[in-house]
Image (spheres, rainbow, N blue to C red):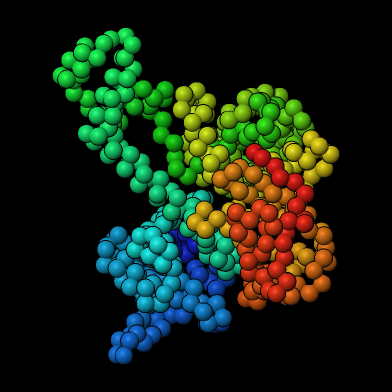
């Protein structure tokens, strides 16, 4: 069963199969069933139900569920019947108190929808942050993200850290937008605009004339949403949040356009992450194009045999049956489209995208490529400027590649690790027995040695395995 199928089954358990007036006690059983579908076992004491925990000399707390691994508390779950208003501040305060008392970073509130909370105070952020809320909808990309994060087989600190950074970055951007709007409306900005205009007028008018005119000018900055709507090329089009608009990527520094040789999928087909959906010919080579998303192929923007510029919409993927009429035309003709794509290049890229960039580079110099299954990949963490990855013991039994992405400098570091180069892995790396993986962390500014911080006595300097540094 793939992750999206698993999410759809959770929707059935938590929403479709219940009565709207189900009691909280019965709904609790449904939530337990849902977590067991994610691989957690009540029998193995990984799901602790209404555990009474002493707090202080005489106090006790009884959280609805605590998810554990080998006796260690991982996150707490508070359950409310679906008919209750889950946005009630009292529910959030109760979950927050459990998280603080149990010293847990994550808490989940489950009722009419799922809300994921984060104790940001532990990492110098806000006290209590709503990272995301997820509605029970089939083929919901947020649901897929929930499964990938909290499924027992994939649950680890790296995934959690990446998720936190992604959500906090989004929240921070929203706050910065509001802050900038406020600054633009302030009197200080008005004075600055006057000052800049005076400088612009110098040379054409003397100072006396300029001062006399600007003495009676009042400048106001007004953020006019209605005006923007009137200027939009297709003001009636609303882009659904759940869809993914895939544009023709820049696969090399010189690439300006590409031709779609063939499509492996047709409109209406279900796409899974990793599927080869098309073959694309660039000035360097013909390459297979992998999808980074799961959902229905809703639209095709470039037909077989057509050549298009980079950033042209290639395809749209999303929940089955989503109406996307007019979106391709809107994006391809929008004057803001180039700006949108420039913003995307500042975000951390996914593994498959990094491999595509590397393979284009390698093919150009020696007609070689690297494989996804033989590659370990890590994005630099934006909070602490470190790379953190966890290869399995089996990975060291073969030749494998390590790719580190520095999204700030837009550089990919490609390492080639020969098999059996470390005879006794435990002498070199920190082993996490609960997940059967070796945890490796490298300081982001250490491009001289790339030394593992978590290693044992024989700390590994990965610099000797570095074979290429690729800018993108």
How far across and how far down the image is residue 37, in percent? Answer: 55, 68
Residue appearing at x 67%, y 32% in the figure: 253
Q: Quadrant location of the N terminus?
A: bottom right
Count of numbered circles on the image = 0
Left or right: 377 with respect to 152? Answer: right
The residue nearer to you, when weighing 269 against 380, is 380
- Above or below 242: residue 20: below
Q: Position of residue 64 (x, y in %)?
A: 39, 76
In the rendered structure, the answer to whether residue 423 lies left or right of residue 312 reads right
Could you say where residue 211 lies in the image, as x and y percent from the top left?
20, 17
Location of the C terminus (image quadrant): top right
Observer-nearest residue: 337 or 431?
431
Residue at figure coordinates x 69%, y 28% from the top left: 254
Q: Nearer the viewer, residue 99 or 144?
A: 99
Task: List the single residue furthest toward the left.
Answer: 216
Residue 185 in the image: above or below residue 459: above
Is residue 321 visible to us here?
no
Q: Residue 95 placed where, x, y %?
A: 35, 70
Res 388 visible:
yes
Q: Based on the displayed image, in which of its 4 quarters is residue 204 positioned?
A: top left
Who's the residue at 31% across and 14% down the image? 201
Q: Is residue 67 left or right of residue 152?
A: left
């Amino acid at each position: 069963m793939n992750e999206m199928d698993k999410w759809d089954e959770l929707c059935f358990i938590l929403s479709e199969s219940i009565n709207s007036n189900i009691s909280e006690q019965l709904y609790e059983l449904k939530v337990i069933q849902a977590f067991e579908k994610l691989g957690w076992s009540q029998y193995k004491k990984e799901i602790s139900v209404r555990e009474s925990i002493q707090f202080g000399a005489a106090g006790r707390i009884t959280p609805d569920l605590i998810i554990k691994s080998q006796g260690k508390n991982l996150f707490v779950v508070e359950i409310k019947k679906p008919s209750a208003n889950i946005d009630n501040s009292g529910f959030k305060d109760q979950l927050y108190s459990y998280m603080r008392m149990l010293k847990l970073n994550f808490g989940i509130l489950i009722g009419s929808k799922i809300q994921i909370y984060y104790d940001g105070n532990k990492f110098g952020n806000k006290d209590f942050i709503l990272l995301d809320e997820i509605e029970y909808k089939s083929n919901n990309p947020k649901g897929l993200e929930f499964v990938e994060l909290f499924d027992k087989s994939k649950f680890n600190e790296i995934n959690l850290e990446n998720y936190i950074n992604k959500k906090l970055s989004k929240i921070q951007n929203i706050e910065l937008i509001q802050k900038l709007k406020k600054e633009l409306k302030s009197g200080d900005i008005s004075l600055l605009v006057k000052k800049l205009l005076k400088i612009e007028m110098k040379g054409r008018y003397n100072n006396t004339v300029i001062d006399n005119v600007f003495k009676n000018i009042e400048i106001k900055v007004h953020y006019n949403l209605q005006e923007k709507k009137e200027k939009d090329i297709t003001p009636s089009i609303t882009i659904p949040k759940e869809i993914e608009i895939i544009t023709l990527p820049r696969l090399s520094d010189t690439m300006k356009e590409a031709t779609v040789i063939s499509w492996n999928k047709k409109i209406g087909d279900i796409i899974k992450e990793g599927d080869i959906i098309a073959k694309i010919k660039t000035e360097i080579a013909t390459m297979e194009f992998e999808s980074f998303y799961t959902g229905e192929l809703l639209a095709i923007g470039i037909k077989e045999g057509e050549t298009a510029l980079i950033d042209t919409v290639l395809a749209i993927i999303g929940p089955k049956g989503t109406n996307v009429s007019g979106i391709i035309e809107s994006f391809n003709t929008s004057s803001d489209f180039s700006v949108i794509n420039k913003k995307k290049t500042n975000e951390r890229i996914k593994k498959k995208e990094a491999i595509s960039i590397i393979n284009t580079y390698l093919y150009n110099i020696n007609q070689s490529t690297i494989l996804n299954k033989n590659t370990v990949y890590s994005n630099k963490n934006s909070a602490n400027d470190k790379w953190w990855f966890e290869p399995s013991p089996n990975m060291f039994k073969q030749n494998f590649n390590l790719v580190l992405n520095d999204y700030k400098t837009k550089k990919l570091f490609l390492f080639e690790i020969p098999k059996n180069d470390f005879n006794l892995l435990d002498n070199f790396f920190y082993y996490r027995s609960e997940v059967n993986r070796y945890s490796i962390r490298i300081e982001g500014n250490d491009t001289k040695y790339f030394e593992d911080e978590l290693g044992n006595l024989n700390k590994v300097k990965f610099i000797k395995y570095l074979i290429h540094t690729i800018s993108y």
